[in-house]
Amino acid sequence: MTDPVLSMYGLNESECSVTAFGNGLINHTWKISCENKDFLLQKINQQVFKTPEDIMDNFRLLAEYFKYHYPDYLFVVPLLTIQGTNYIKQGNHYYRLFPFIENAWSFDTVTDPSLAFEASRQFGEFTGLLSAFDPDLLHITLPDFHNLALRYRQFDDALQHGNKERIAQTADSSRFLKDQKAIVEEFEKIKKHPDFKLRVVHHDAKINNVLFDRRNNRGLCVIDLDTVMPGYYISDVGDMLRTYLCPVSEDEQDFSKIQIREEYFSEIAKGYFSEMHHRLSEYEKLYFIYAGKFAIYMQALRFFTDYIHNDTYYSIQYEGHNLVRANNQIMLLKKYLEKEEMLMAILKSCMYSP
Ligand code: ADP
Ligand code: GN1
Ligand code: MG
């Protein structure tokens, strides 16, 4: 099935093995093993990404920038076809081929603080090296993706027009989410400040979007760059706090397992500041802890809204899955808020250390 695609890269499918690969939720991914080289083939998910050409143009712009300014940085660049394009359109589907990074692996959960440090350093390095790149040159691949005010309006709208039965069953959750609206107001305020800079941000800083060196678990590079767009650093730091601090994922149904691991917090901070402390303004740094509230709250709103709209965005494994996810994130937010002072003290201790 991949034959016409592979032949456009000069590869002969009969000499390669093709296997489904990875645990990504958005794109389709295959490992292509040929005689003396491996590749990674991806089909872009067009339900989510409506303008794949824009994504691939962003890749081109960033690849050129890194090649010129930081040739040693490992930026995983899509390979060119025989015709010189960095993707293929086959029927209505878009494909791209990457070199396979050997001796690398990725993780789905963060099981050691050193992984949090390494991943955070990778996301910090990515944004840091692109500090002089004009973020407005990038195409917006998902409009309003991390626009918290819009996410709140969508939540509010779901409560007006969504599934009535589900709305009635979830009054406690929706009340809590409404009570936290100050998190949206804070975002609206800080966005207006001139020292809160638009930067090149990944926007999906989960642990499985980092490749690690199998031999020593050092971070190698960030991957899954479809959501790289202009944004605020709190998007990446926030998603790391959301997904690395807690020992269990957003799918966990046993909420007694939800907790905030302080030693992971300090590693996220140290990793990010090792690359970004001299680039972030003092004003931006004030919002490091806020980043966690921003991301956890936004994710809770998104899962809850999708539940009220009968699960149209996030794929579910069982009835009520999105409500579990929303309530899981609500619990995480409560735990995070309880620890805010403690986290502030930890942050002070690692902010200015090298
Ligand atoms: P998705 O958007 O579906 O999450 P990703 O781009 O993150 O897709 O890829 C899915 C998985 O494939 C990653 O978590 C990683 O394990 C693996 N992977 C992606 N790119 C490469 C690469 N160039 N070399 C080796 N493994 C890769
Ligand atoms: C989606 O595909 P994945 O799992 O990396 C979502 C993120 C959410 C995440 C929650 C394009 O990411 O924004 O944080 O689910 N990506 C998109 O698990 O909506
Ligand atoms: Mg991914």
Image: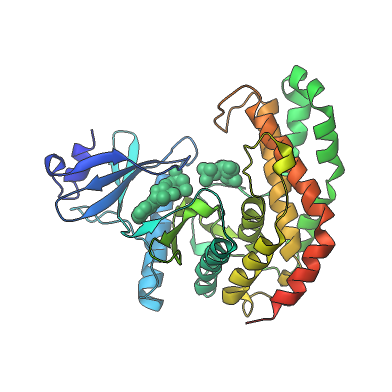
Q: Residue at x 81, y 40 (%)?
A: 177
Closer-to-camera residue (234/116): 116
Q: Residue at x 66, y 56 (%)?
A: 241
Left or right placement of residue 214 versus residue 137 in this view: left
Q: Quadrant of residue 131?
A: bottom right
Q: Quadrant of residue 306?
A: top right
| Residue 283 visible to the viewer | no
Question: What is the quadrant of the C terminus in the image?
Answer: bottom right
Q: Residue 311 placed where, x, y %?
A: 61, 27
| Residue 320 visible to the viewer | yes
Would you place residue 290 above or below residue 26 in this image? below
Q: Residue 47 placed where, x, y %?
A: 47, 34
Q: Quadrant of residue 58?
A: bottom left
Closer-to-camera residue (145/287): 287
Q: Residue 55 placed where, x, y %?
A: 43, 51
Residue farthest along the top direction in this orientation = 165
Q: Residue at x 58, y 61 (%)?
A: 116
Closer-to-camera residue (43/50): 43
Q: How is the image coloured?
A: rainbow
Would you place residue 227 above or below residue 133 in this image? above
Left or right placement of residue 167 versus residue 8 in this view: right
Closer-to-camera residue (226/195): 226
Q: Residue 307 placed where, x, y %?
A: 67, 28
Looking at the rendering, the quadrant in which ligand 2 lies is: top right
Q: Residue at x 64, y 49 (%)?
A: 247
Number of marks: 0
Question: What is the quadrant of the N terminus in the image?
Answer: top left
